[in-house]
Amino acid sequence: MNRIYAPWRAAYLMKDHKEETGCLFCGFSGDVGDDEGNLVMERGKKWYIIINRYPYTTGHIMIVCNRHVSNFGELDEDEQGELTGMIARAESALQSAYKPDGINVGANLGRSAGAGIVGHLHVHLVPRWNGDTNFMSSIGETRVVSEDLGDTFKRVRNALRSEEDTR
């Protein structure tokens, strides 16, 4: 049997999920106090940037709407405008922090489209490198993430702050 070391999952697996009610992302909207513990790196007026706890690759982040909406058609003009700016900032920060060969940017609208958290609009930014889809992903159906989530948080947050300083 193959084993992949993923220590950050222990806290989630040991948590009593019966106490959770409502939408996970709504729980992170607004000022909830422990942004670092929740892996929220930056907050705008309408959106926030968070590390994906179950990343596809190192540096996988999400931009999440503060308001509980399920699709782009429900966004108001301010939300649309801020989202575009945050995607650009996040893309630039990932380029600076990881120098990937490419970045996938997308949203999964609905369970059948692959949404893990259904009904709360969020956009994924996934850094990609030539050859990052190897036998582990293709045959073993296992992802290997080469960086601790805390280190990812610090690296991308610092890159976001550097982006802000240069504007």
Image (cartoon, helix red, strand yellow):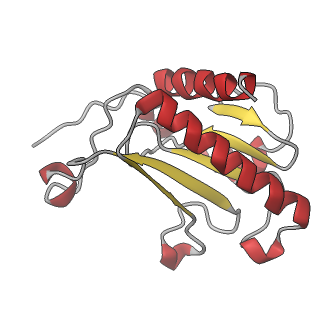
| Residue at 73% in and 70% down | 70
Give the left or right position of residue 5, taking residue 46 as reference: left
Total number of numbered discs in the rendering: 0
Residue furthest to the front: 167
Position of the N terminus by quadrant: top left
The one nearer the camera, 161 or 18, is 161
| Residue at 22% in and 57% down | 141
Q: Position of residue 3 (x, y in %)?
A: 18, 37
- Classify residue 106 by image quadrant: bottom right
- Classify residue 83 by image quadrant: bottom right
Position of the C terminus by quadrant: top right
| Residue at 57% in and 34% down | 93
Above or below residue 122? Residue 151 is: above
Give the left or right position of residue 2, taking residue 88 as reference: left
Q: Position of residue 41 (x, y in %)?
A: 67, 31
Above or below residue 99? Residue 150 is: above
| Residue at 22% in and 54% down | 137
The one nearer the camera, 156 or 55, is 156
Above or below residue 38? Residue 60 is: below
Above or below residue 116? Residue 114 is: below
Q: Position of residue 38 (x, y in %)?
A: 65, 32
Q: Position of residue 85 (x, y in %)?
A: 74, 49
Residue furthest to the left: 1
